[in-house]
Amino acid sequence: MSYQAPVKDMLFCMTELAALDRIATLPGFEEAGIDTAQAVLEECARFNEGVIAPLNTEGDKHPSSWKDGAVTTTPGFKDAYRQYAEGGWQGLQHPADLGGQGLPKTIGAACIEISNSANLSFALCPLLTDGAIEALLTAGSEELRKTYLPRMVSGEWTGTMNLTEPQAGSDLSLVRSRAEPQSDGTYKIFGTKIFISYGEHDMAGNIVHLVLARVAGAPEGVKGISLFVVPKFMVGDDGSLGVRNDVHCVSIEHKLGIKASPTAVLQFGDHGGAVGYLVGQENRGLEYMFIMMNAARYAVGVQGIAVAERAYQKAVAYAKDRVQGRPVDGSLPGAGAIIHHPDVRRMLLTMRALTEGCRAMALTAASAYDTAHAHPDAQVRERAQAFYEFLVPLVKGYSTEASVEVASLGVQVHGGMGFIEETGAAQYLRDARILTIYEGTTAIQANDLVGRKTARDGGALAQAIAGEIEVTETALVRCDSEAAHAVAARLAAARHAFLDVVDFVAIRGKSDPNAVYAGSVPYLMLAGNLVAGWQLGRALLVAERKRIDSDDAEFMHQKIALARFYADHVLTRVPGLRDSIVDGARSVNHFVPEAF
Amino acid sequence: MSYQAPVKDMLFCMTELAALDRIATLPGFEEAGIDTAQAVLEECARFNEGVIAPLNTEGDKHPSSWKDGAVTTTPGFKDAYRQYAEGGWQGLQHPADLGGQGLPKTIGAACIEISNSANLSFALCPLLTDGAIEALLTAGSEELRKTYLPRMVSGEWTGTMNLTEPQAGSDLSLVRSRAEPQSDGTYKIFGTKIFISYGEHDMAGNIVHLVLARVAGAPEGVKGISLFVVPKFMVGDDGSLGVRNDVHCVSIEHKLGIKASPTAVLQFGDHGGAVGYLVGQENRGLEYMFIMMNAARYAVGVQGIAVAERAYQKAVAYAKDRVQGRPVDGSLPGAGAIIHHPDVRRMLLTMRALTEGCRAMALTAASAYDTAHAHPDAQVRERAQAFYEFLVPLVKGYSTEASVEVASLGVQVHGGMGFIEETGAAQYLRDARILTIYEGTTAIQANDLVGRKTARDGGALAQAIAGEIEVTETALVRCDSEAAHAVAARLAAARHAFLDVVDFVAIRGKSDPNAVYAGSVPYLMLAGNLVAGWQLGRALLVAERKRIDSDDAEFMHQKIALARFYADHVLTRVPGLRDSIVDGARSVNHFVPEAF
């Protein structure tokens, strides 16, 4: 089954939910209107459907391999990456003066979805390069920026994030890699980093590692961590590649999924020290890394949507093709395609509702990001930034948890064939399973949502968002549509549940952290569920307005029905989550560690 | 991490929830009291922990392999199977006059859990033999029984179920394999069967295939299917093995999980016809196969509990060992084991609550089965049989869906390590993923629950079960325990939701099947959730009574707290499911097949 990018739904989300027309009035984005969006998405679809998607199965069958320190990527990847770079895709969202196209995230995010639907393993490489570019743009010296950024933006070189060490995963305070200052202003880096995606590969001329390490004498904990650029090959003043730096890939992992993406163990400084260049100031490394990590977290959320979309398309194709069983309503004389069975449609619609809901949420968040970066009014920027930051853990946490559910349903739709690897449905489940883990597990996202995004301001922003949801409800109630009324009722119930939980988090956060954190992930799931459902509610309002005169009456009718499906089958999970959070902490905390 | 059979919890369930003392008063089970149960379980634990469990990773790394029609199982499997047979484990639940031990299912089911926790791939072979024995016991001629059963009960020969064909999976009416009557009373069988677990292997002297096929001239559909015994090797009158029969394994599948278990494509009759022996009467094959399938469905539910238990134990061990992050309540001066984090405990407790809830439900069902088979009073037998049959789709459907959730949480607890295959957590997820598919997908179980188990009697049995749940609620309310009151309230809410859905199914089942079947799987999940929670509520009542004087005060306290956890974190899903079922059909059925 070939992948077809959902360009139409993406353009609908951009124009109707993410206000692309307003984004296109912001300084720097004047050319990023709907016509540009459509042209870029169609070209992106063409390239990824044709070149990248066919390598997805290949990467699963023939993972990247390691020999004597070198990693050979899946056959076809190197050439595909060359085409990716030549097509200018790496620079899509990056500044024009560095060779990029300077497009808004609202458009860029959709392109990232397309490339990740095509091939999650492949697209992870540019995703990490994007993050490294962000970090250097924000915190790198003029010299570092000049040396590295143009070649990263062009895709000639790729970037990595080196955070994790065997003893330091979610808890970066435990990082032990060390950096010794040299007289020439550089540092020598020593240590072991694990789980480094594309930490070594053969697709690009150089690899720019961004590495967390401690300078001798730095404070304990996260306040003593600095960020360094450690290139695989040294770079001369003229930009030429020099000798190999002292960073080596000692092995790659044997993983459940995304097998084509090499996950490296990197050894720094076993032969005298790897040359590193300080990014920004000493001991502020975590702060800079968070720039990179926040970009990557958002993008991983989009990976979730991407793999969900691909799993959905495959399941639909199978359900239309596989003949088995007579429809329960007797509408066919004998056995029909399994899509005639209500339960198969329920599974497919659950997949689609989660995918489209998360896409709408992600593109709405991207629009806020663009506003926060380009709007001339500081207050508008600040509000948009706060809204974006509230949404990031939801885009990351909820979309990826949803992607595992969607991919698992995709297996189920295929029945016994789903369990056979050659079918391909199982690969999506295996691939998706990393997404709730890397770039911060769902629990880490939930900590962010609880601590920085909710408790810190006493729940004020969360309540303000609930206020906006209520505005949508009011519009739905006023709409002459049974579906709109049904959705409004579910949204209201979910919003009230959300407000209860926000109060619980804001009030109890300090006094009883064990109680609040016992419900942190359910809170994230509740909030993500609600915000995605809200976006589908907004979509319904648009569709009710457009369904009469539109050339796309059927598309609009489906938007209406899908919002209702989401309300009745997904938003219905919310009140129960509220109960688990508000009433459920006691039983969690009854079990002290010794009770297991 | 080594597996330790949860013998204590199993004995608690048997004695306190499944009335083993009453079972041991039934004719034939007089020796099956608590002492026997304990001795059998401890020996079963010893054997499986020591011999079978260590082969689990091995089977994943070195799956069974096919060459020239022969299947070589994972190194170690053949010898382990010999020990399994010699230990008499295959005969545990089978009649003493055939060489079995004649133990009740209430004890046998716990043993099946243990062997499947140890090694799902390995234990699948005896599980299928059990089913084949059941079918021959019930429907086989005296001669077939004499020829095959003693050697199957001893484990010398194994059995298979040959149902599926490329075009006939869930829909057996499409079976095309054919049987040609011969003058000597045998049949010649022709056709292709797929997905035949242990359809070919090297662990036993012979393989007894039970095969569905159509006799020439039989009616179309399921009423024209007959059941045949087709041995791999012909059996002489003296029981000696003769020539190879014309059934050949042409390939085995490359699967997501249970890789050690060979999944065969079997070709019957390519060299003149495979000799088959009719089981029972012509055209009643599906009826006989359902004997086998119902036994297997129950057992697959137990497989779900088994893999969930194993995943839970592994996750607990990791969570106690892995140091990462300071507890949010500041109870440790620095980083502690991750089990100190409330969200990790919430995940572990979700795993444990689902596992113990499903185990309690399965053992309660087993007790009903034993009563239905051995009670002297026909009315009691009939009531017990009806209760058992209501529970089978829940044990199969809910326990296996839960097992996927549990195994996926197990991966999540391990963080990045969970995605690395060497860790082993991912194998449980891959293995578990078949359980909601084989022996009838969750949707097939749900069809059974909706049609035969609920709509047929107008919901009467379901309502009677709700009445029993209400009795438990009343006892909980009368109990001087805050936890009991909390559980009673959640049970009551869930029971009311259940009754709403039962009404919906009973009333609308005929008039609007599309509406009812759009909610069939959510109904199964609701009912399974409720019945498992009910059993944990019953366990709480016992524990409240026993916690004072018991030597096991801590065990009893944990039973109480776990019931409350289940109530607040799992039963809370039920009201939302009710809403999806009762209000959610319209949006499912709005999407006609062409709308995808």
Image: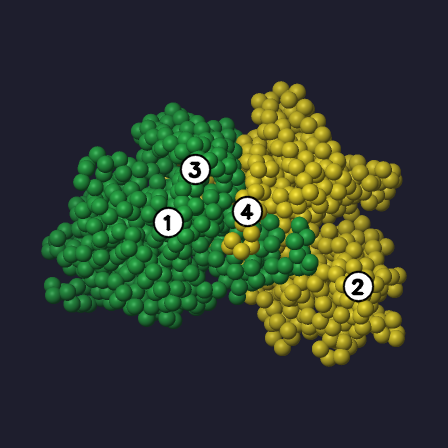
Chain colours: A yellow, B green
Asked if badges 1 and 4 are on one and the same chain, I answer: no
Residue drawn at the location 80% of the way across and 66% of the way down: A218
Label 2, label 3: how far apart the Cα atoms are: 53 Å
For mark 4, give the secondary structure: helix
Same subunit, labels 2 and 1: the answer reads no
Q: Residue at x 26, y 51 (%)?
A: B33
Mark 1 vs 3, N-terminal side: 1
Q: Few, some or many C-alpha atoms within 10 Å of disc 1 (few <14, some 14-19, many ≥20)?
A: some
Disc 4 target residue: A590
Q: Quadrant of residue B546?
A: top left
For label 3, the SS is helix
The kind of residue on which mark 4 rests is: His
- What residue do we see at 44% from left, 54% from top? B309
Q: For the residue marked with disc 1, what is the amino acid? A: Phe
Q: Chain of mark 4?
A: A
Residue bearing mark 3:
B530
Foreground pick, A471 / A595: A595
Element under disc 1:
helix
Q: Can you identify the residue that label 2 sits on?
A: A219
Label 1 to label 3: alpha-carbon separation: 20 Å
